[in-house]
Image (cartoon, grey):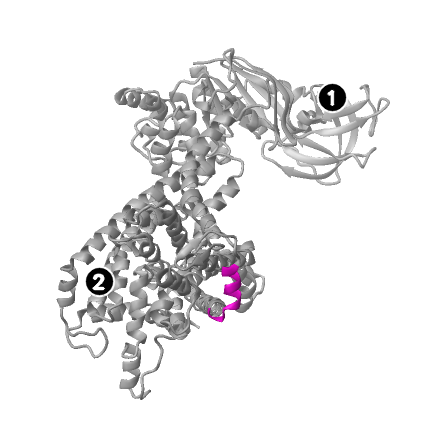
Amino acid sequence: MTLKAREHRLGWGLVAPALLWTGAFFALPFLAMLALSFARMEGRQIVPALDPGNYTRFLTDPTLFGALLNSLEITVLVTALSVVLAWPLAAIIAFRVPARWQRLALLLAVLPFWTSYVVRSYAWLLVLGQNGVVNRGLMAVGAIAEPLEISATRTATVIGFVHFFVMLLTLTIYANLIQLSPNYARAAADLGAGRWQTFRHVILPLTLPGVVTGAFLTFVLCIGDYITPQILGGNSELTVPQLIMLQLGRSGNFPLASALSVVLMAVVTLAYFACGRWLRLDRV
Amino acid sequence: MRVLSWLYLALAYVFVFLPVAVLVAFSFQDGRLPVPPFKGVSFRWYEKVLGDGDLMAALGHSFLVAVVSSLIALVLGFLAAHALARVALPGSALMRGVLIAPMTVSYLIVALGLLNLFNLTGVRLSLWTAGIGHVVINLPLCFAILYAAMGDHQKNAERAARDLGAAEWQVLALVSAPMLAMPLAAAFFLSVTFSWDEFIIAFLLTRFDVTLPVEIWSMLKSGLSPATNAVGSLVFLVSVTLVILLEILVFRRAK
Amino acid sequence: MTADVQIQAVSQRFGASTVLDNVSLEIAAGEFVVLLGPSGCGKTTLLNLIGGFAEPTAGAVRIGGRDMAGLAPQHRPTTTVFQDYALFPHMTLRDNVAFGLRMRGVAKAKRGEKADAMLALVGLEGRGDRRPHELSGGQRQRVALARALAVEPDVLLLDEPLGALDLKLRRQMQDELKSIQRRIGTTFVHVTHDQEEAMAIADRIVVMNAGRIEDHGPPREVYLHPKTLFTASFMGEVNRIPIAGGQAPFGPVALPDGTLCLRPEAITESGPLRIGPCRVLEAAFFGAHVRAHVAPVSAPDLKLVVHLPQSAMPAPGQVLDLGAETWGVLST
């Protein structure tokens, strides 16, 4: 056997376990899900078929299609807000905070990132709820007479999401910013660029890969999340993940749940190709 | 500009810590509801929580699932990253894509796919099935971190070891792994925290023995209670300890 | 401890590009051979073929008469000193040097002893407990050398080992490499693109270009009697003067048609092959000599580079009467 063949056999041997795992527990289930999305429900029985009914139902049923619109609206809003809020935060930590305090400042800024997902949403419920800290506080100072309806609305969902993703994006953008050599800004200034021009033409384009990668992760995690809209948004307007969970729990309608998942994945794939050029997932 | 920067930073910290502060503060509430007014300090909710057998069992389950699934993800990710970084296999770009792919998919879809698979094959749901799901989501993370960490320096050292007569397992054990100690630790700790916090996979893929986030979820259903605050605070404490350990052990030494 | 290397009609192709084209070379046991050439000439590929990090598309590599086909690096009687040293950062110097012996199952005490002896050989006596990051570039280089030599290879392969060192240290390490090689008698195959380094250490220089061997021989031979124009200009600065019908641009010469190659230091005021009066265009002091650009009065378009003695410092515009030394006429 040649050296190259031996190298290859070794390489395959080492990469095989990971590939097999991903194949068996990710690719295969996905294919099964795809097949199941074309199955039919008869009573509580799943009947294998090649029936696009779940998809036509999705397109025609306003509850189902509306959920996708809700999901998209929330996700786009959350992603945009998070980027806009996180960029300055990351920049302030990277450029204003003295070098020796930077790691601490960053660690603090994202510490609640590490709280349990469920607990974090619950905590926002305590803040935003009818008797929550915000309402009680505002009523105590006389700003409002009646408690605001924040919890169980889209606003609460968005606040909960933005809280989480600002932290995530601060991490990715900060990592991008500190890798930039200070000489870029110096060179730009040296060549006569003002602060705004330096930012607009040099720093911002250089951080674009980090921003896009972070924004994509935000998009993926946000659009697929069940917990935050369920706890904070309640049942007033459903998102796709909430709808999927409803199908699983109430009616055991696995085919419809699968079809909705496929739709969700298609949306994510579209988003992936939309920002594919700048995406560096292997360098997160 | 300067003043505005500090103001922004301060506001950001307030926003980021507001829910956590409220959570922790009202875990000491001497009353039945974790909302204002604050009625005094009491540790009774912590006593209740620590004495709750189901919760403590869930805590143990979470720990077990997190450590075991992270170890598996770490080993698989390490071997794959090593192979793809060093051997020019045909289709290696495709393989990298396949290994990273689960990162771009919602946990809910991973969970639903596995639930279908287990239903179809008649596998009974348990902590093990949830663990399988956690490996699926943590494997891309471990792979990506380790693959990015394998630079030319690393490759040349491995080449030198091979040149001096090391068999492949010796290269891995004596050169690659020790040289990658920091990224290995980082990948492991990150996996553990992700698995430890993960809800939807654990919720859909466990049956009788559940993990802590699932147990907390079922507490939520019975409404607001300082007991939930107490559990949440404890979980936060554990996560934060892990992160700070990681910071001190890995990043400080890496400098 | 030492062996000869035979490279027999070796070719290496990657897809459409040919990196090595039918290369044959015999290296004697105990010889210090330097593969010299510009980047991309195939010298590192050839080294990799000897070391077993790649296999030739065609042809064979024999070491000590044994065909190396299908043998992985660890099974060949060769070791390599890598360009970036590739020291194991998590091991002490002793453990680094003893690594190969450990792989061969040598007992701990014995391999430690041997490692210390090797460290002493390269001038790092008593530093076995240090770690690579505590060392300077030159010291790391020595550790890499000691590590590769500790397993007593028949052939030591060196891949631009001095490339990362500054000039002064590089000159010093060249001398040490040469003296170590003399002492242990192992065959050394050394790759570099620095022709001064090649001349300083080689028993024989193999000049490579575009996947072929252009020339080979002792340093003096390839410098003074290069077989090709490429070698002539790669080994050092050279003036090329076209000759047609016994006429050079500056006048008649008793040489066959072709290109007359003159080293700058071969042009002097007393040289017997007369060029005639030349106008100095510019001159700069180079320490050991004065480097000047001149043009023959009779052929002002022909620019020549000459090395004049240290003491001379002609002003631009000055006219010198120059001629070439016969030893400096390169036969191409």
Marks 1/2: CA–CA distance: 88 Å
Tell me the crowding category of disc 2: few under 14, some 14 to 19, or many 20 or more residues within 10 angstroms, Cα based.
many
Quadrant (top left/top right/bottom left/bottom right) for the N terminus of chain C: top left
* Magenta range: A53-63
Q: Amino acid at mark 1?
A: Thr
Along the line of sight, the residue nearer the viewer: A12 or C85: A12
Q: Residue at x 32, y 67 (%)?
A: A121
Residue B214 showing in the rendered view: yes
Residue B232 coordinates in the image, percent (x, y): 24, 63
Q: Residue at x 48, y 45 (%)?
A: B98
Residue A98, quarter of the rendered image? bottom left
Rendered image: mark on residue A230: none
Residue C142 coordinates in the image, percent (x, y): 41, 28
Instruction: Say if the magenta span includes residue B142.
Output: no
On the same chain: label 1 and label 2?
no
Placement of A159 over or under B174, stated as above or below: below
List the single residue furthest toward the right: C245
Residue C217 showing in the rendered view: no
Left or right, A236 with reference to C210 = left
Residue indicated by mark 2: B231
Q: Amino acid at mark 2?
A: Val
Along the line of sight, the residue nearer the viewer: C25 or C310: C25
Q: Chain of mark 1?
A: C
What secondary structure do most residues of the magenta stretch adopt? helix
Q: Residue at x 57, y 65 (%)?
A: A193
Q: Residue at x 51, y 57 (%)?
A: A266
List the single residue furthest toward the top: C65
Residue indicated by mark 1: C332
